[in-house]
Image (cartoon, helix red, strand yellow):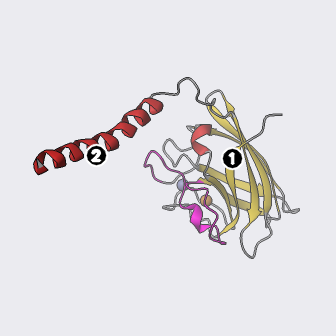
Amino acid sequence: MVKLNSLILALAAAALFAAPQTIRADHHEGHGEGAPPLPTEAVAVLAPTEGNNVKGLIMLTKKDGYVHVWGEVHGLTPGEHGFHIHEFGDLRKPDGTSAGGHFNPDGHDHGGPGDEKHHAGDLGNITAGDDGVAKVDIKAKGLHLHFTVGRSIVVHAGKDDLKSQPSGDAGPRVAVGVIGIAQSK
Ligand code: CU
Ligand code: ZN
């Protein structure tokens, strides 16, 4: 009798653990009914990392075959600055390093956006004028907008040489912002 009781208990426990998984699997099938639509526009408000004064507003708009990344960054030193999508939307460290490395779902080497293979997050450089303002207007191919949401945009103190591994030797992070779904107008 003792053995039978423990068998029943074991079966009941197995059923308890199995049941939620079955339900969850159903919910995960495809992008089905009841699922919200995929975002078509996202926004990142860039704030300075500790000791810096760089700010910006970047929009990401889904287009046919690319994502249009556009906006402005202020407070830069004149010249080129590395500009990337980094893996995490995690701003817990004041120097921005908690955003992780470049967003790289395909396991490629670092490169420039014009190279055949590069990190999906490699957006190259932005260029600030003498006023410290950089206008951003980038067509990012091979990027899916919905996979960027929850990650971050990072602006660097220096220029991305588009070849040094793993991140173009672009120096410290001067501004960072989390990519979120934009409210449609
Ligand atoms: Cu970067
Ligand atoms: Zn990279």
Identity of the amino acid at label 1?
A: Gly
Q: What residue do we see at 66% from left, 62% from top? A: 159
Distance between the Cα atoms at labels 2 and 1?
Answer: 40 Å
Asked if residue 95 is among those painted magenta in the image, a careful observer would answer: yes
- Which is the main secondary structure of the residues drawn in magenta? loop
CA neighbours of label 1 inside 10 A, class few (<14), some (14 to 19), many (20+): many
Question: Which residue sits furthest front?
Answer: 1
Determine which quarter of the picture holds residue 18.
top left
Cβ–Cβ under 8 Å for marks 2 and 1 = no
Numbered disc 1: secondary structure: strand
Numbered disc 2: secondary structure: helix
Indicate left or right for 8 with 59 as reference: left
Residue 115, image x, y percentages:
53, 44
Question: Which residue sits furthest bottom?
Answer: 51
Residue 185, image x, y percentages:
84, 34
Q: Label 1, on which residue? A: 180
- Name which of mark 2 and mark 1 comes first in the sequence: 2
Which numbered circle lies on residue 13?
Answer: 2
How many labels, in total? 2
Q: What residue do we see at 76% from left, 62% from top? A: 47
Which numbered circle lies on residue 53?
Answer: none
Q: What residue do we see at 56% from left, 23% from top? A: 33
Residue 123, image x, y percentages:
63, 49
Range of residues picked out in magenta: 86-109
